[in-house]
Image (cartoon, rainbow, N blue to C red):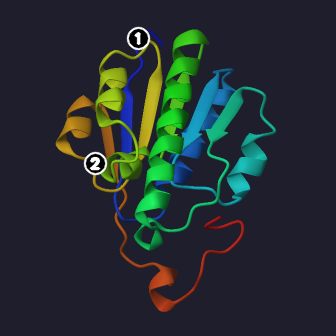
Amino acid sequence: MEKGLIHIYCGDGKGKTTAAMGLAMRSSGRGFKVLIVQFLKSQDTGELHSLEKLPEIMILRGNRKHGFTFNMSEEEKELCRVEYDKTLNKGIEICKTESIDLLVLDEVIGAYNLGFINRDCLLDFLKNKPEKLEVVLTGRNPDESLLGLADYVSEIRKVKHPFDRGIKARNGIER
C-alpha cells in the first residue's frame, strides 16, 4: 500500500470489534504485520485465542480487570487513565519503530470519549502517522475530530439484541 487510510467502525450495534478483527485476519493472511491495541476490555475473548496463533499479529492490552465504567470510583477511573495512556503510547511507539502495516485501536473511541487517553496525543498520531500505516478505530459516538480524519466510516446500528431480553454474552458469539 502506498498510503494507509483511517477507518472508523462505530455505532450501537454488535460487530465493531468483529469487523476490525476480520480485517486484521485478512491483512495477516496477506503477510501484513498487524498490531491490535485494546482499550476498555480485559475479559478473555475467543478472538484473542485465534489471533494469538498468527505470527503476523501482535496484541497489546491492559493487564488489570476493569468493570463497567459506570460502576467505577474516581480512583479506579484514574488508574484506567494512567494504564490506557501507557498502552496508547506503547502502541504508537511500536508503530513508529517497527514495520506495522495495520493498527487496530479497539474501543479507543470510548477511551477517548471518557478521557481515559490523551486526546491530543491520539489526534496528533493520526494526523502524523507513518504514511503506509492503515489504522482502524472502533467504538461508539466518535466526535467530529475523529470523523474528520477518517477515510472510511462504517456505522453498525442495533436493530435488535438478545441482551435487551436479559441474555448475557455467550462464549464464541459475544466473547
Question: Image quadrant of residue 65?
Answer: bottom right
Q: Residues within 10 Å of mark 1 (few under 14, many from 20)?
A: few
Residue in the image at 39% along x and 17% along y:
129
How far is disc 1 from disc 2 in space, using C-alphas? 23 Å
Residue in the image at 77% along x and 40% along y:
52
Dot 1 amino acid type: Glu
> Residue 145, how many percent across, how many down?
20, 36
In front of the other: 15 or 119: 119
> Residue 138, how many percent across, how many down?
42, 47
In the image, residue 46 above or below residue 99: below
> Residue 97, how many percent across, how many down?
58, 10
Quarter of the image for the C terminus: give it: bottom right
Residue in the image at 41% along x and 71% along y:
70
Q: Which residue extends farthest bottom?
A: 165
Dot 2: element: loop
User: In the rendered image, which residue does mark 1 sit on?
Assistant: 131
Dot 2 amino acid type: Pro
User: In the rendered image, which residue does mark 2 sit on?
Assistant: 142
In the image, residue 72 above or below residue 97: below
Disc on the earlier residue, 1 or 2: 1
